[in-house]
Image (tube, helix red, strand yellow):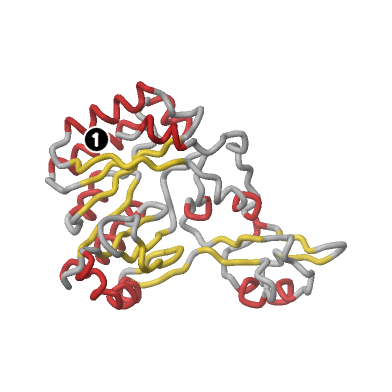
Amino acid sequence: MITGTILKIQRFCTDDGPGIRTTVFLKGCPLHCIWCHNPESQAKRHEIMYNSKKCVACGRCAVVCHKNCHSLEAMHKFERKMCIGCGACAEVCPTGALELYGKSITVDEVYNEVKRDKAFYETSGGGVTVSGGDPLFQPEFTAELLRKCRENGIHTAIETSGFANEKALFTVLEHCDLVLFDIKETDEERHKQYTGVSLTTILRNLKLVNDKKIPFIIRAPIIPTLNDRESHFKSLKTIRESMEFCQGIQIMPYHRIGSYKYELLDRKYICNDISEPSKEMIEIWGI
């Protein structure tokens, strides 16, 4: 029985492919984009988010934690490095100051959830999208879920950064009707600087998707001061025109909605000085 690690299953989505869809968000991503609005999706392991503003120092977490991650002296202190993500503290926290992100689940459990809305998929031309994190980070789980959906007449899609080895890519593509393919940056050095990985593998895999004759949509974020330049969007247009099965480019405006999550994970958000793109900027770079 194949088990994966997910963040959540979100029903009635309209932005993750055609029609009404259920989106399964997996945990784990090979990229670490400096502007990422879902930092809790980057690591595959289970993680605790701690919001000190909600904490009432009741001490219940310290009682149930077997790793002694919680202490109550002058105030509540959470030692993240010792945490194994078991979630016991989150279960007893009365205020939601402690929340567990990450759930181990089987393919059958996910499928039993997503099939509930099959009637909506059929009437709207929708289906199931596996997102993340990145679905290629858990290829066996993703492939088996998509296979089961497709076998039962449900349209399948993935949203991916495209960074994976060929085996993982082909394992998943075998069961894909549509790929939402993210391209963050078209300059190699900038891509490494902003995401931590090489662009070369991503562009190779984009070509492989096209060679497999699988329809795909390029998703391109606009990050002011980082990639809002003419050469980048010209390169995106060139990529689109060179790929027969590309169905277009979808511009994804940068937003700061998830920036607060970094503090809850004891991380630093380094894009605080970047503003969200204006309506005019989005129109200018619309492709």
* In the image: residue 250, left or right of residue 50: left
Determine the residue located farthest toward the right in the rendered image.
74
Residue at mark 1: 204
> Are there few (<14), some (14-19), or many (20+) residues within 10 Å of tag 1?
few
* Residue type indicated by callout 1: Arg
The residue positioned 30% from the left and 64% from the top of the image is 21
- Is residue 163 visible in the rendered structure shown here? no
The residue positioned 61% from the left and 34% from the top of the image is 273
State the image coordinates of residue 126 (x, y, percent, origin top left).
Answer: 24, 63
For the N terminus, the image quarter is bottom left
State the image coordinates of residue 93 (x, y, percent, origin top left).
Answer: 68, 74
The residue positioned 49% from the left and 36% from the top of the image is 277
Q: Is residue 216 above or below residue 196?
A: below
In which image quadrant can residue 97 be found? bottom right
Q: Secondary structure at mark 1?
A: helix
State the image coordinates of residue 248 (x, y, percent, origin top left).
Answer: 23, 41
State the image coordinates of residue 281 (x, y, percent, origin top left).
Answer: 44, 32
- Is residue 30 visible in the rendered structure shown here? yes
Q: What is the number of callouts on the image? A: 1
Which residue is more in the foreground, 169 or 125? 125
Which residue is more in the foreground, 32 or 154? 154
* In the image: residue 196, left or right of residue 153: right
For the C terminus, the image quarter is top left
Q: Is residue 263 above or below residue 152?
A: above
Q: Is residue 195 above or below residue 262?
A: above
In which image quadrant can residue 47 be found? bottom right
